Image: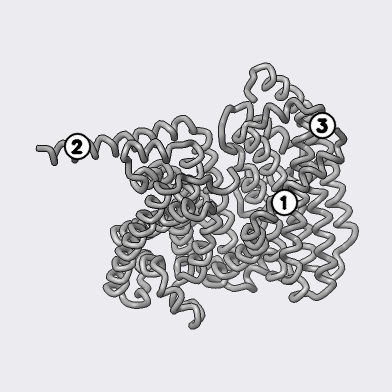
Amino acid sequence: MSLKSIAKAELLIHLWWLKNNRPLLVLWFLWPYLTALFILALGTAYGRIEEFRETMGIASPILYIFVGSAVVFASASIVDIATGIALWHRWIGTLTYIYLVPVRFNTYLVLSGVVGGLFMIVQNFAAIVPAIIILEGLSGGLRLLAVLGVMILGMVPLIGVAVVAAILTIAARVETNVVSFINPLLLLVSGIFYPVEILPRILRVLSDIVPVTYIVESAKLIATYAYPPGSTIVYIAAILATMALVYNSWSALIVSRSERYIRRRGTI
Amino acid sequence: MAEVEYKLEKLTRIKAVVWLHLVRSRRYFLDMVNWGIVDFMWISIYILAALSFTPRENYPEVVPIVFWAMFAWSLMSMPVWTIGNWVRFYVSMGVYEENELASINHSIFLFLRILPALLVSLVATASIALLLRYVTGINPLVAREPVLLVASLLGILSVATIYSLILAYLGLILSVPAPLLDFASFLFFILGGVGIPVEKLPSQARPIALATPYSHFAEVMRYSITSVEPYLGLEVEGVVALVYLLVLVLLLKIVSSYATRKTRREGVKGIGRT
């Protein structure tokens, strides 16, 4: 059983599931728009768009809110997907069989998370493409591709976190995703729709070490410059690459130990 | 005498259901904690986003309104998940049939799920108030008319609960999970006059807002926080809100009877993927 065939199977699961749930597909395409509308409506009802532009230090606030809404739904989805897949197999009673396949359980979780995460990122960005092209023309669409690239890179440091979260959920013998707070936590500290400086000190410290903060920075760049400075993009990419190396090395240690633990305890 | 015994038996059943939900909450304690943190974080993100549009000098007026509006939204969306969505598990765990055999009212069983959910919601909201106080220096827990504020929030919770019970029964009839059917509550918040006062909505959107039950309770809620007169006047808003509540109760009765008859005739089908 090759890794490619598992990745292909995961992709087909997502495609077929959407094919059988077409209303869900429509809703998923609408969610970034609803979120953008929600923030714009609530914000402008009691304030001004110019204030938002000034507070966030960006040139195109509406463009930024659309990109930010896609980031909200996709940036850290890998964690929820990997955990959700593990729980889903437990619910339907197939977790034991997944353990028995020749590929290691960790590898399966990584592949499920990565394929699902990529699927989510592409889907959310595809959803906002029409709005970006209307607002900024073709150049806006091309700049969006840069954020898409950063977002895919930003997913890499979270691979290990996603697998640890999935294994911990199984080890905790719970039936629901008890670590679903990770996704909103990453977004809260990233300062996606407000400056990080207003947050309490502990959250500001956390903000510097989560990948989503740098995805948000890249979204700010495309909402400010027609041609985002290459050096800043390279700087962001370098930080994310370093995070990927550090976080995945740490989590690899935790993952192998926790997998042994759940095998020994029979918690699958 | 027989009537008294019947009423006592009914009360015992309700007590048993409350006990079951509380025991379940203890069993899923980690889930409850996670749920509270998630609630706190999502609502904080949206409130802080809204405040990024507001000049600092307007904070004393805006912070309490946005805070209570988001709390109202939390009350609107929480029952959709705890009741509307939970019906999936209710069916897949086989409790539906068990309750059917024991003559336990499904609406009451699902409705009482609100108790642990409300507890989580209140703790999350108190934490958001603390965060807002830290970030803005304004205490959002202020109201000009606290009794009216509580009454309007209870009204919003009642509408949301009845709406969620209707979604749960529709889930049983259509096999579609409630969150998919809940597209409306997101729009209700924006166009339905909950997040934004009816007066401030575009003129084309005002009839839509007035046609939704939430807007009337929300107008009363805003009146209790600030001195802004409700769009239709306080008395009229109150009466219209109560009429809507009665209509929803009637609608719930019709949908629940239909769903119960259908499941008794055809059996219960699974809802959604799980």
The quarter of the picture where residue B253 lies is: bottom left
Disc 1 vs disc 2: which is toward the camera?
1
The quarter of the picture where residue A192 lies is: bottom right
Most foreground residue, B72 or B211: B211
Work out whether residue B163 can be spotted: yes
Note whether B95 is above or below A54 in the view shown.
above
Residue under the image location 56 percent in, 34 percent down = A175
Residue under the image location 48 percent in, 42 percent down = B91
Q: Is residue A184 left or right of residue B85?
A: right
Note whether B228 is above or below A84 in the view shown.
below
> Which element is circle 1 on?
helix
Q: Residue furthest front?
A: B265
State the residue position of label 3. A249
Q: Which mark is residue B8?
A: 2
Q: Amino acid at mark 2?
A: Leu
Task: Locate residue A73, reporting x and y percent.
Answer: 67, 54
Q: Amino acid at mark 1?
A: Trp
Quarter of the image with the N terminus of chain B in it: top left
Q: Amino acid at mark 3?
A: Ser
> Which element is circle 2 on?
helix
State the residue position of label 1. A16
Q: Are marks 3 and 2 on the same chain?
A: no
Residue under the image location 69 percent in, 66 percent down = A66
Query: For mark 2, does the 10 Å Cα neighbourhood hold few (<14), some (14 to 19), or many (20 or more) residues?
Result: few
Real-space Cα distance between discs 3 and 2?
62 Å
Quarter of the image with the C terminus of chain B in it: top right
Please tell me how many numbered marks the rendered image carries: 3
